Amino acid sequence: MKETSLGILCISVAFLLNHIISQFNPFILQFVNLYSIPIIYLAIKKNDFSTIIMASTAGILEDISSILPIGVNALKKLILIFTLGKISKMISINSTLGYWLIFFLSVTFEVVILILITGFFGLKDPLGGFRELILIQPLITSIIGAPFFKIFSKLTEKE
């Protein structure tokens, strides 16, 4: 499976899972960023124009389910993939611990970017009363995302 097909499939699955979770308990959505899992993988493994399109699409889909204006999360995802694209050329990750660490740092960076963007535009605090999200969301997302990094790698190398 090519990375582009995998990215489209994973972003669609993340959208469906977000929708299902929001029907049962929308409070849980604050603790995991499912859209970041395929985007981080694509930014590291394949950083090209299709990754930019998928990152902005994932960001807009994330915007739809949040209280933020359309485009804030898309901008956040674009800054993330450009940063990861530069960093991924300098490092090599081959272990589950490395995958976990890159996910944790990437999602933490994403939360910081979100705070900076909303502050720059004078928008309401995106974390609300949940300041703990700056560590909890990256932790949970990296615990979920690290195994998927290995699965995505196996799926894309069988070509």
Image (cartoon, helix red, strand yellow):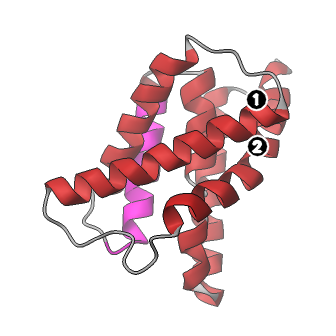
- Amino acid tagged 2: Ala
Of mark 1 and mark 2, the one earlier in the sequence is: 1
Residue that label 1 marks: 1
Q: Could you say where residue 34 lies in the image, as x and y percent from the top left? A: 61, 57
The reply to whether discs 1 and 2 touch (Cβ–Cβ < 8 Å) is no
Number of numbered labels in the structure image = 2
Residue at image point 56% right, 11% down: 90
Instruction: Return the x and y of residue 157 as percentages of the image width and height.
Output: 81, 20
Q: Quadrant of the C terminus?
A: top right
Q: Quadrant of residue 147?
A: top right
Position of the N terminus by quadrant: top right
Q: CA distance from mark 1 to mark 2?
A: 19 Å
Q: Residue furthest top?
A: 90
- Magenta residues? 51-67
11 vs 34, nearest the viewer: 34
Query: Magenta span has 40?
Result: no
Q: Amino acid at mark 1?
A: Met
Residue wearing tag 2? 146
